[in-house]
């Protein structure tokens, strides 16, 4: 099961709040949504708790990270398996916003 592999890879830790959870309280989040060209590859998937995934909602990740400082700090600390290209674009977008 791919979901379980993602949870194991991320040590059952939500990349947004930084807390660890049992697998039944976790979701897999697409960093770059599929509707915006993202895929289902491991480099585009992260572990998120249900609460953080709900808080993020359908916002672009850069919008969510801009608004949530703790999530921004945790994401760049824990989302180490995200494709470098995606991380670079996120950082650039956040820098533009100040």
Image: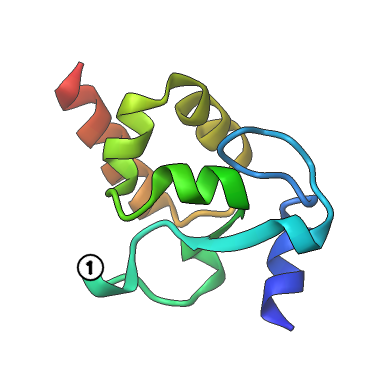
x and y percentages locating residue 71 in the rendered image: 50, 30
Residue found at the far bottom of this picture: 1
Q: How is the image coloured?
A: rainbow
User: Above or below — where is 53 with respect to 65?
Assistant: below
Does dot 1 land on a helix, a strand or a loop?
helix
Please tell me which residue is depicted at 34% across the width and 46% down the height of the picture. 61
Locate the N terminus and report the quarter of the image it occupies: bottom right
Please tell me which residue is depicted at 45% across the width and 57% down the height of the picture. 83
**68 relative position to 35: left or right:** right
One can see residue 72 in this view:
yes
User: Above or below — where is 62 with respect to 11?
Assistant: above
One can see residue 80 in this view:
no
The one of 26 and 41 positioned closer to us in this rendering: 26
**82 relative position to 64: left or right:** right
x and y percentages locating residue 38 in the rendered image: 33, 70
Residue found at the far right of this picture: 22
List the residue tagged with mark 1.
Answer: 36
Residue found at the far left of this picture: 96
Please tell me which residue is depicted at 45% across the width and 42% down the height of the picture. 55
Tally of marks: 1
Locate the C terminus and report the quarter of the image it occupies: top left
x and y percentages locating residue 89 in the rendered image: 27, 44
The one of 57 and 76 positioned closer to us in this rendering: 57
Circle 1 residues within 10 Å: few <14, some 14–19, many ≥20: few
Q: Quadrant of residue 23?
A: bottom right
Please tell me which residue is depicted at 59% across the width and 32% down the height of the picture. 77
């Amino acid at each position: 099961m791919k979901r379980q592999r993602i949870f194991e890879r991320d040590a059952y830790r939500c990349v947004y709040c930084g807390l660890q959870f049992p697998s039944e309280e976790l979701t897999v989040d697409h960093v770059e949504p599929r509707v915006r060209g993202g895929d289902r590859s491991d480099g585009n998937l992260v572990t998120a708790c249900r609460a953080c995934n709900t808080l993020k909602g359908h916002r672009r990740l850069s919008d969510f990270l801009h608004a949530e400082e703790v999530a921004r700090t945790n994401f760049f600390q824990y989302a180490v398996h995200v494709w470098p290209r995606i991380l670079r674009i996120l950082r650039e977008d956040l820098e533009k916003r100040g």
